[in-house]
Structure formats: structure tokens, C-alpha cells
Amino acid sequence: MPIIYPAKIIKNDTFVRVEHEIEFFNETDYPSVIWYEIPVEFENLLCGDNMNGIVIAVLPIAMILEEKLVIKGKLSPRLLFGLREYQRVFHSILKDKINFIDIEPNALKPDLPYVKNSSAISLFSGGVDSFYTLYHHNRQNEKVSDYQISHLLFAHGLDIKLEEQTIFERVFENYNDLANRLDVHLVKMKCNFRRYIPDYSMFHAPCFLALAQCISKNFSCIYIPSTLSYRNPAIWGSTIYTDHCFSTEKTFVFHNGANKDRTQKIEQLIFWKETYSHLRVCFSPNIEKNNCGKCEKCLRTMIPLNNLGMLNRYSVFPQKILWSLITMIFFSRKTISPHFYHTTMIQCLRRGKILYLFLLCCFWCKCYLYKRFIPSHKNIYDLVK
Ligand SMILES: [Zn+2]
């Protein structure tokens, strides 16, 4: 059984590091200490004596190993209830991969009561979904003060891996300037949570929400920007079915933005000039630019921008969409859900971009056929869609 021990706090002039020793029943290669760090200036956000956040981070590996989770500390009753439901959802669909396990805290203690003048924190990567949520719930546009975004959580060790230190620092400085202009705090957090996750695409949401719950002392709400829409939901890393399960009595987790698909979000974001020099969607970012302009996700963003006549405003992308790159992606082994192309195809049709439409139709067919008929291309995401 994984046993999570109480926190050990290490503090210096620049950051606070919180460590929990973790012990597995069977011998494993997983680290024996799970940790996260936060700059000293945000120390007041740390939750103190509960273990709500760290339990969320460890739950996926406990489910995969089928080991009871023992917590040497306090847990929110609301969260314990939610974690059971989270397990039910995943176990009901992936019975042979993900198990239902018991969670045993030393004690149950409701999260702090409602905090007056509280606000919201949003997970932030700089992508289309992050900017969409930030735009709609910033201080200017969100009318309910408790749900106005005052902080953005920017994580090092998750989407950007721990070893990618230089890239992280460059991107962070870029977004920190933006955050100052928008009057929000960009909270830099570092952690080793990803080391416990064998399938990151399936469990990235618990990693991010674990970090957010670790610093949720003054927040009514944690926004997690949606990837998929209500019209095309799926069970994977972050989902409308389960993200709310990571809420406590005080801090509600809100899966946000699923009323729009990716193409519709881009159609709104082109009117926000801040995105022109800050949008970052790339699978393979390099040190020079936010986006390579060559990978599937870059192209999937550049084509709608080009259809709208706005690609030339975005300095973070190359200004030309090369047909050779699109062809290379078509013949690569990588496949994703065909859903991601569907709405862009409709936009191409409406805008009369017949050549793009033809190429995207080819992608759509390839992804659909691979997903259905070639087992080696059935990743865990395809299996559950
Ligand atoms: Zn790229």
C-alpha cells in the first residue's frame, strides 16, 4: 500500500519546498519522496495541515498498482467522497487497467470554511484553452468577485518537464510580464508529481489539480480550462465527468470552457491582442519561439488563424503553412482523436478553403481508420473515446 507521511517543510530565501515521504508495499522504481516548491512570496497560499493536494497526486499510481492508499494526516470528507466517484468513473470504463482502491486517512477534517474576499486561481499553460478561460473570468469580465481570477498557476515538472529548465524560465518570464499587465499573479510551482504517472495523457488533470489544491487556502474556485467540448466529451486526463471530484468544502474545481470547441475559442481569441505575442500551443517548443510551426498541434492552430486572416498578427508562429509539413504529419505514425479536425473542417468549408478542407479530411480519415482498425495505434485515449 502507498503510505503518505506528513509534510516536511524546507525553506530558504527564495522558495518553500514541501516534501512527503511515500512508501510502497511492493518494491517500485517510483521516488520515495514526493515534493513541490513555491516561491517564498506565495507562501501564504499554502494549505497548512491537511493532505488534500498530495493525496490527489498519488491516487492514480495507487489505482494502477491496486494498493490501498494510507494517509498519515487529515483529509477533506468532501474530497474523499469525490475521489471515490473519480475512481468509479475510470474503473467502470478501464477495468483491466485502473482499479478501485480504499483511501484511509488518519482523520477527516472539512476544508477551511468560506473565506471572505476570496478569489479564483486558474491553471495556465499559455494555450488556446488557458487564454479563453482567463479572458472570460478575469476581473473585467467575471461579475462574481469570488470567481474572478486573481492567480494563475504555471507548473514546472508537468507539461514542461523538470529537465527543461531553460525553456521553462524563458516562458515563465514572458508570461510574468503579461500577468503584471493584467493585474494577476503568476504562481510558479515546481514538482515531481509526473514521476508517479505512467500515462501522463490519462492523468495530467490530477497532477495539476493536486498542485492547485496544495495552495488553495484563499481560493473559492480552481479553473481547469477544458480541452474537449460538451458536444464531444471523453474520459481521459481532464474531463467534465470527473474534474469536479477534486473539490473540497471550500474550493470548487470548475472544468471551464467546454461550451466552445477549439476552433470557436480561436475565433474569439483573435480579438484579444495579448494573444498575438503570447499564445503557446506547441508539442515541441524550442528556446527561440513559443511554437515550432511544424507539429500537428501548431498546424491545427495555424490553419484556423489563417482561415480567419489573422495568422500574420501572431508573431509566435511562422507566417507560412508549409504543405510539405502537413503531408509529413499525414504519413507519420502519430494519430490523435479525429474530433480535433472536425470543427476546423467545418470552418474551412464556411470560409471556402477547399485545399485545407481536403487535407483535413485526409487526416480525419486516417485518424478514424487507425483508431478503429490498427491495434498498435490504440493508445489509452483512443480506447476510451
Ligand atoms: Zn509545434
Image (cartoon, helix red, strand yellow):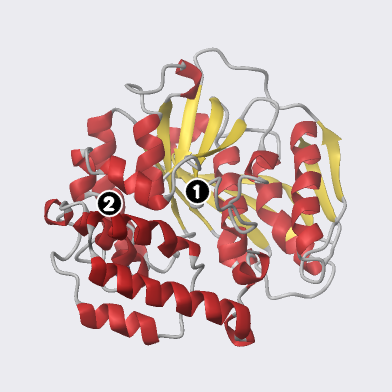
- Helix, strand or loop at label 1? It is strand
In the image, residue 189 lies at what x, y percent? 46, 48
The structure residue drawn at horizontal position 55% and vertical position 36%, both measured from the top left corner, is 215
- Across and down, in percent, residue 5 comes to 75, 50
The answer to whether residue 340 is left or right of residue 208 is left
Residue drawn 61% across the image and 84% down it: 373
Label 1 crowd (10 A; few <14 / some 14-19 / many >=20)? many
Q: Which residue is mark 2?
A: 279
Tag 2 secondary structure: loop
Which residue type does callout 2 highlight? Leu
Please name the residue that numbered disc 1 is placed on: 37
Report the quarter where the N terminus lies: bottom right
Please give the name of the residue rendered at 79% of the width and 75% of the height, measured from the top-left corner.
27
**Which residue, as the protein is rendered here, is positioned at the far top?**
116
Q: Return the x and y of residue 134 as percentages of the image width and height.
A: 37, 36
Q: Is residue 300 or residue 63 the one in the foreground? A: 300
Look at the image and tell me whether residue 181 can be seen.
Answer: yes
Disc 2 and disc 1: Cα gap in Å? 26 Å
